[in-house]
Image: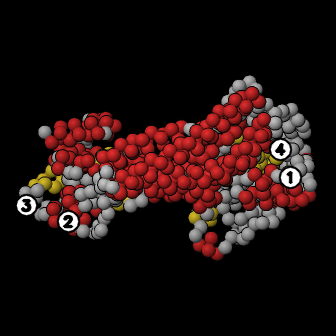
């Protein structure tokens, strides 16, 4: 009867868990778990694993044992979010929730047989069920990944992991996988949040300021998609190993054996050695990206075409002496809103990534190049070098950086020292090599990090095997034209003008509602406050759907917007009406104020876009 009651609760609240449980029931290993009575009348379970039997709870007094475990957790706030890892028969869960009954909590059990024993012997109705946010059977890595992603998105602070010590001793593999995944997701979320905070405004301001360049230069993809099928391309990065390959690159360029693309700072090493690539690629959104092209501008070099990502630091494009071509990046919501080809086709974009090499590899794949040959893609230190010669703004690796370094596999199978940034670039490159099928990536970087999915071949052998004759068309960019639909642009501009005016009115209305809520909370008028929350929700939903907000303002505040969106559920669940009201007012007011200031700041740039479209 207990099991049936628990199944009814699970099937109603978490149907996906119920579906998994139903499937799991058919494959239970009945020999793994045995139920026994303890001396004081409580139950315990013994686990038969690796030829020996181990008790999960004390044979004498499991209640006192559970209390000892929970005594380690002190001064837990009511707004804590708890994961109980390893359930057993739940004595430690009962003890914790008796002490801290108001926390939100999840029950996570990686061993199906133990979850079955728990649900067969413990009524979920005895728990503070309204605070139970999920029951997870974690024997599927993908499901665990989804759960942890959702959990960390919703609960960015005050996360408590309550572990059953015996569980991780008996099932160490499951525990290691869980903690490794948990740490990896937390690190990834932190990195993503830092990136969003660092670049969220620059991505949009760059895209707005670069819009004039985008509509007056050819789209490198639109006219060339698939045009260079099976032509070899050299992707030149600025790692220290580039120094070793200068003469090989000179030979390839002079004899047209492959198309040569510089990425990021490598343009400076090539110019330093009197080599001009077929194109220089750039996308970094920071103000410092302009340094990369200082030498090209100072020397007035007109013979190196630039391919820029549309969200690149706008200062980079100013006074560039050569021809310019663009690719629309995934961070550029502006171009994606205003632009359509003359034929009405969707515009291909390249996905943003931690490295211009990864962005350029996507571009080369779309254009049809194959194989793609990596040069100077160290993604690791070489002694104290981080860049090749000629990168005049490069600094040596410091002793502190070496101390904090990460050891990864090298192309030779040894270990090599790198840092977190380089390592993320490597992982991202590996991801795209897996995702983009049907092309070969050769890594010629001597002493670099191993990149999964590439074949390491020294450059001399690559030339001998793959680059046997001239393939480069000297006029490879001459047929490009500008092909965006002007009428569509003007229609979108008119729609955006209406949205701009509506956004300003919605901001004012939301301020007014928040002031009303604030007054009601002060006057202890909680019923009327609840009605006002509904008006706030409706107006905020309109704001979220407004084109001006969606294209310009919300992306400029994506980190804050995500935090607000993920906290709405917990605000609505707050039981104290005063705390609930204050949290709602403070959270929404803070966010709306950020939006108001950004609207004010970008209005002149927005007017520039309209001027460029109309002229």
Pick out the residue farthest to the top.
343
Pick out the residue farthest to the bottom.
399
Label 4 crowd bin: few (<14), some (14–19), many (20+), radius 10 Å: many
In this rendering, which labeled residue sits more in front, label 2 or label 1? 1
Q: CA distance from mark 3 to mark 2?
A: 16 Å
Tell me the residue that label 2 is attached to: 67
User: In this orientation, does residue 615 appear?
Assistant: yes
Label 1 crowd bin: few (<14), some (14–19), many (20+), radius 10 Å: few
111 with respect to 590 (left or right): left
Q: CA distance from mark 1 to mark 4?
A: 11 Å
Picture quarter containing residue 475? top right
In this rendering, which labeled residue sits more in front, label 3 or label 2? 2
Q: CA distance from mark 2 to mark 1?
A: 71 Å
What kind of element bears circle 1? loop
Tell me the residue that label 3 is attached to: 40
323 with respect to 13 (left or right): right
Q: CA distance from mark 4 to mark 3?
A: 81 Å
Tell me the residue that label 4 is attached to: 324
Q: Are marks 4 and 2 in contact (CB under 8 Å)?
A: no
**Number of on-image labels:** 4
Q: Are marks 3 and 1 in contact (CB under 8 Å)?
A: no
Q: Are marks 3 and 2 in contact (CB under 8 Å)?
A: no
Tell me the residue that label 1 is attached to: 319
Nearest to the observer: residue 128 or residue 452: 128
Q: Residue at x 44, y 52 (%)?
A: 515
Label 3 crowd bin: few (<14), some (14–19), many (20+), radius 10 Å: few
Q: Is residue 385 above or below residue 537?
A: below
Nearest to the observer: residue 256 or residue 461: 256
Q: Which mark is residue 114?
A: none
Placement of the N terminus among the 4 image quadrants: top left
């Amino acid at each position: 009867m207990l099991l049936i009651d628990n199944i009814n609760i699970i099937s109603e609240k978490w149907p996906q868990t119920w579906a998994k449980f139903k499937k799991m029931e058919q494959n239970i290993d009945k020999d793994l778990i045995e139920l026994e009575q303890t001396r004081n009348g409580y139950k315990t379970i013994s686990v038969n694993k690796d030829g020996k039997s181990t008790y999960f709870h004390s044979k004498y007094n499991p209640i006192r044992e559970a209390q000892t475990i929970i005594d380690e957790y002190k001064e837990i706030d009511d707004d804590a979010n708890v994961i109980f890892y390893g359930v057993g028969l739940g004595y430690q869960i009962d003890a914790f929730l008796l002490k801290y009954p108001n926390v939100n909590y999840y029950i996570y059990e990686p061993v199906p047989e133990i979850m079955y024993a728990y649900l067969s012997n413990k009524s979920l109705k005895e728990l503070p069920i309204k605070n139970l946010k999920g029951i997870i059977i974690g024997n599927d890595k993908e499901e665990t990944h989804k759960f942890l992603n959702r959990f960390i998105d919703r609960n960015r602070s005050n996360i408590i992991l309550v572990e059953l010590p015996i569980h991780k001793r008996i099932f160490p593999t499951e525990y290691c996988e869980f903690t490794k995944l948990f740490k990896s997701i937390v690190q990834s979320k932190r990195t993503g949040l830092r990136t969003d905070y660092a670049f969220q405004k620059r991505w949009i301001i760059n895209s707005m300021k670069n819009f004039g360049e985008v509509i007056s230069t050819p789209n490198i993809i639109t006219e060339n998609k698939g045009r260079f099928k099976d032509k070899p391309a050299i992707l030149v990065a600025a790692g220290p190993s580039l120094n070793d390959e200068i003469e090989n690159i000179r030979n390839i360029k002079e004899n047209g054996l492959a198309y040569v693309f510089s990425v990021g700072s490598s343009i400076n090493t090539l110019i330093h050695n009197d080599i001009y690539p077929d194109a220089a690629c750039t996308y970094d959104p920071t103000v410092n990206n302009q340094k990369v092209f200082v030498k090209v501008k100072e020397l007035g070099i007109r013979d190196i075409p630039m391919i820029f990502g549309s969200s690149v630091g706008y200062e980079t494009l100013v006074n560039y002496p050569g021809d310019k071509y663009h690719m629309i990046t995934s961070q550029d919501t502006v171009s994606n809103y205003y632009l359509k080809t003359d034929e009405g086709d969707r515009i291909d974009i390249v996905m943003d990534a931690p490295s211009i090499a990864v962005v350029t590899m996507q571009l080369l794949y779309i254009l049809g190049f194959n194989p793609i040959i990596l040069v100077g893609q160290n993604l690791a230190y070489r002694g104290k070098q981080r860049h090749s010669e000629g990168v005049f703004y490069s600094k040596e690796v410091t002793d502190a950086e070496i101390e904090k370094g990460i050891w990864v596999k090298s192309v030779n199978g040894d270990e090599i020292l790198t840092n977190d940034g380089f390592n993320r670039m490597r992982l991202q490159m590996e991801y795209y090599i897996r995702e983009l099928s049907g092309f070969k990536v050769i890594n010629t970087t001597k002493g670099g990090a191993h990149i999964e999915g590439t074949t390491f071949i020294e450059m001399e052998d690559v030339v001998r095997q793959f680059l046997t004759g001239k393939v480069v068309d000297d006029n490879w960019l001459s047929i490009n034209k500008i092909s965006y639909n002007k009428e569509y642009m003007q229609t979108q501009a008119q729609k955006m003008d209406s949205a701009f005016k509506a956004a300003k009115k919605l901001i004012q209305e939301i301020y007014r509602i928040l002031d009303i809520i604030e007054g009601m909370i002060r006057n202890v008028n909680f019923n009327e406050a609840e009605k006002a929350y509904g008006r706030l929700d409706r107006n905020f939903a309109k704001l979220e759907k407004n084109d001006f907000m969606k294209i310009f303002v919300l992306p400029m505040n994506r980190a804050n917007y995500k935090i607000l969106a993920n906290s709405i559920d917990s605000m609505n669940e707050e039981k104290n009406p005063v705390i609930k009201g204050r949290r709602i007012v403070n959270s929404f007011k803070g966010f709306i104020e950020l939006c108001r200031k950004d609207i004010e700041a970008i209005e002149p740039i927005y007017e520039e876009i309209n001027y460029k479209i109309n002229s």
